[in-house]
Image: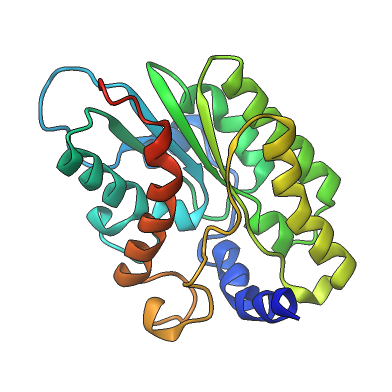
């Protein structure tokens, strides 16, 4: 029953993750320019190892000022805690797991230590085959791990209109990918935020600034243990 209620709560947020900005064909250069940017300006010219957030509108921070997005909040936390990392926001609104595969090579250019993967919501909205999504996520994690990059994989819920079997299979896929490919696992990216009006923007869908701060705390709990204290 708890999962059914949760699925009902996230149905509308999931719908707008894709609808906020539909995935349309764009040139490679245009996507790279829009997505792979530092989450905040580095405080010095000395190169830092990177933490890359690969995701959709939830990562991009649709409707938020740049500094209010989850990757930017993580950058601020890192700076406050004395970690010398550069956070890169590689979020593209409307993106699917297949889009993440296509963007992966340039997202991982340079000295990347950690990859945070937040993808799959748009796969679920469109009712794409779970097996296809699982293969895409597995490829992303595998290719990152082959470069000795630590991966944090975040789970998502499918809208309930595709039925309980699809919803359960969808949810299970994230955990299985994390277990099979040695990734740190966050069960639900929107934990405590989905379906809570006070934590979402005026559209009632995407997290507002306070909601993003709650998500930042969820991600930080998974991220902090894998950080290099010498950075």
Residue shown at 29% from the left, 42% from the top: 39
Residue 148, position as x, y percentages in the image = 53, 16
Q: Is residue 85 left or right of residue 197?
A: left
Tell me if residue 125 comes above or below residue 88 in the rendering.
below
Front one among 18 and 23: 18
Q: Look at the picture and state if 175 lies above or below 19.
A: above
Location of residue 133 (image quadrant):
top right
Residue placed most toward the observer, 70 or 82: 82
Q: Quadrant of the C terminus?
A: top left
Which residue ends up furthest to the bottom in the rendered image? 197
Q: Is residue 135 shown above or below 171?
A: above
Residue at 74%, 58% (x, y): give it.
171
Q: Classify residue 4 by image quadrant.
A: bottom right
Residue appearing at x 76%, y 81% in the figure = 1
Q: Residue 129, how many percent across, how many down? A: 84, 51
**Which residue ends up furthest to the right in the rendered image?**
165
Q: Position of residue 8 (x, y in %)?
A: 68, 81
Specify whether residue 27 is in view: yes
- Find residue 149 and report its horizontal and vertical position in percent: 50, 22
Q: Is residue 27 left or right of residue 168?
A: left
**Residue farthest to the left, as pictured:** 44
What sort of colour scheme is used for the picture?
A: rainbow
Q: Name the residue: 45% across, 70% down.
A: 206
Label tally: 0
68, above or below 180, in the image = below
Residue 201 makes an appearance in the image: no
Question: Quick one: 227 or 74, which is closer to the camera?
Answer: 227
């Amino acid at each position: 029953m708890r999962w059914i209620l949760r699925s009902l709560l996230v149905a509308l947020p999931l719908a707008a993750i894709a609808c906020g900005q539909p995935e349309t064909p764009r040139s490679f250069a245009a996507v790279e320019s829009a997505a792979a940017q530092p989450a905040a300006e580095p405080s010095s010219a000395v190169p830092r190892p990177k933490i890359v957030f690969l995701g959709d509108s939830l990562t991009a921070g649709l409707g938020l000022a740049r500094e209010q997005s989850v990757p930017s909040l993580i950058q601020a936390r890192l700076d406050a805690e004395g970690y010398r990392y550069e956070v890169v926001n590689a979020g593209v609104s409307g993106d699917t797991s297949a889009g993440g595969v296509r963007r992966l090579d340039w997202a991982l250019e340079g000295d990347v230590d950690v990859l945070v993967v937040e993808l799959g919501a748009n796969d679920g909205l469109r009712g794409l085959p779970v097996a296809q999504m699982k293969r895409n996520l597995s490829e992303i994690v595998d290719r990152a791990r082959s470069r000795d990059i630590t991966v944090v994989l975040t789970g998502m819920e499918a809208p309930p209109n595709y039925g309980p079997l699809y919803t359960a299979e969808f949810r299970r896929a994230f955990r299985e990918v994390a277990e099979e490919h040695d990734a740190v696992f966050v069960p639900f990216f929107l934990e405590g935020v989905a379906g809570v009006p006070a934590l979402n923007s005026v559209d009632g869908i995407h997290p507002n600034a306070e909601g993003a701060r709650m998500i930042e705390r969820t991600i930080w709990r998974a991220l902090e243990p894998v950080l290099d204290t010498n950075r």
